[in-house]
Image (spheres, grey):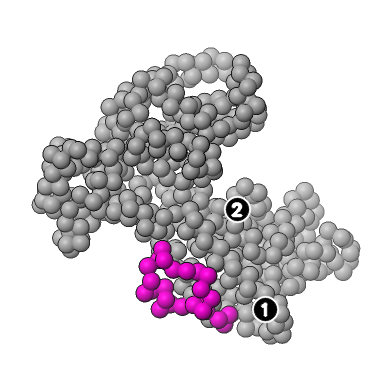
Amino acid sequence: MKRTKATAIITEVIGESEKSSLAEKLKTEKFSAMSDESTDVSTHKASCIIVRYYDFEENKIMSKFWDLCKIFSSDDQKTAEEGATGEKLYNILMRSFSDWDISTENMIGLSANGCNVMMGGNNSVASRLKEDLPGIFLMKRVCHSAHLCASESCKQLPRRCEDLAREIYSFFKNSSKRQFRLQQFQKFVSASPHKLLHPWQTRWLSLVAVIDRILEQWDAFKLFFTDCWLNERLVSTELIFNSLNDPFMQLYYLFLSWILSKFINFNKLFHSKKVVITCLHENVREMYKDILLCILDRDYVNTTELSKIDIERQEKWLNDDQIYLGIRVMNKITQPEVLCHIPATNEFFHRCRHFLITSVKEIKKRYDLDDPLLSKLDCIEPTNAASSNYRKKVPTLQPLMILVPRIIKPDDIQMMQAIDDEWRSFPNILDKIDLTMNIDEFWGLGSKNNLKIIKHWLNLL
């Protein structure tokens, strides 16, 4: 088949059949939606909708493409003038399900980026969902939030840190001659001949890979640009030459390599295909506390509830010589070429301190450290569900059940009691199942035993 026929078969036959099959499942199962809007290469703004649900046939949580809706129509010029408002995006989302006779009663959650149109307190998609679907769970996209936290924090450092990365890449990207000459210097200093990386404008955490590559090639770059500056005196090399010979520029890069890796590792966990929502709360709190301990008195952090710690209390700040900025920074900061520049050293500590302070503030702004629902989801972890010690701390699921009214109706006391009875006797029911299995597969095995509790927990995942 050629392009026209293949396209027609995929869109009109296979696509329609798959969507019809998915719609039948959503009519009977609880599901969450993920939505985002963007402009494609043809300048058409569209809203993409993904649904996430438990598939009893596949025995695991599934995330599937549901719809791609045009936001602006050529038949309605007025809507294009108004823009992508919260009302319009909300109507598009609801219509995509109503057109297939899917009841919104089955919709239990929505995940989207944190922009005001989607998640704002007033006149947004989220505010309308709260009004029309009471009890729905709304969640800002975790990985997008981590990118924003890193972006805001990086503004506390000198702009030349990012400029250097871009200037080096631009200097080499279109010149095979320069790249070949660089390889000679790489061989001289025994550096690996790796290619340079480009820092993306909209993916701030891509900067850490670029920084690591520059640090790896630092000595080779210093020799190369020293040679360029002495022999050619190019204006384009002046910034790079001066930056590479500034010991504090290398210090900033060593600091960024260490701290941004924490955000990268956090993001990697939540890019996993496995169900990880049960450990989201604990991981956010761990990263938050880890950063706090770098700049605040340890006793104050350990004896105060995380959500109540005041990062602005300067009497609890550590002195410059006590701040932790990573091993490589600590090794470099004691060298003579650094110690002799006291004002620059003070500025370095000041900027790094406020980088960490901004990180803490941004995390707290985007995530509720005392989230009533996410803080209780660790009961779904198989090891906790089968642990007698854990049950001493959580003897009943009643506090969790009242937080999910779209899964378990508050007035359905009989169902709540049945679930709680099963929970209390659960260690004796599935004690032979491998507790290291993926969460959805673990509970999926239990669903074959027709346990009421299982189906409800699969909805939470």
Q: Is residue 381 left or right of residue 247?
A: left
The one nearer the camera, 302 or 327, is: 302
The dot on residue 345 is 1
The one nearer the camera, 49 or 94, is: 94
Looking at the picture, which amino acid does disc 2 mark?
Trp
Per the image, the residue denoted by label 2 is: 204
Mark 2 Cα-neighbour bin, 10 Å: few <14, some 14–19, many ≥20: some
> Can residue 227 be spotted in the picture?
yes
Q: How many marks?
A: 2
> Can residue 186 be spotted in the picture?
no
N-terminal label among 2 and 1? 2
The one nearer the camera, 193 or 174, is: 174
Looking at the picture, which amino acid does disc 1 mark?
Thr
Vertical placement of 29 versus 202: above or below? above
- Which quadrant of the view contains residue 354? bottom right
Q: Position of residue 159 (x, y in %)?
A: 71, 61
Marks 2 and 1, how far apart in space? 26 Å
Q: Position of residue 123 (x, y in %)?
A: 51, 36
Report the magenta residues as a range: 297-321
- Which quadrant of the view contains residue 208? bottom right
| Extreme residue toward the right, this view | 232
The dot on residue 150 is none
Q: Kindly check if marks 2 and 1 are in contact, taking CB atoms under 8 A apart as contact.
A: no
Please tell me which residue is depicted at 80% across the width and 54% down the height of the picture: 177
Placement of the C terminus among the 4 image quadrants? top left
Secondary structure at badge 2 equals: helix
Based on the picture, tell me whether residue 84 belongs to the magenta stretch: no
Please tell me which residue is depicted at 55% across the width and 25% down the height of the picture: 70
Vertical placement of 40 versus 446: above or below? above
Based on the picture, tell me whether residue 304 belongs to the magenta stretch: yes
Q: Position of residue 7 (x, y in %)?
A: 53, 18
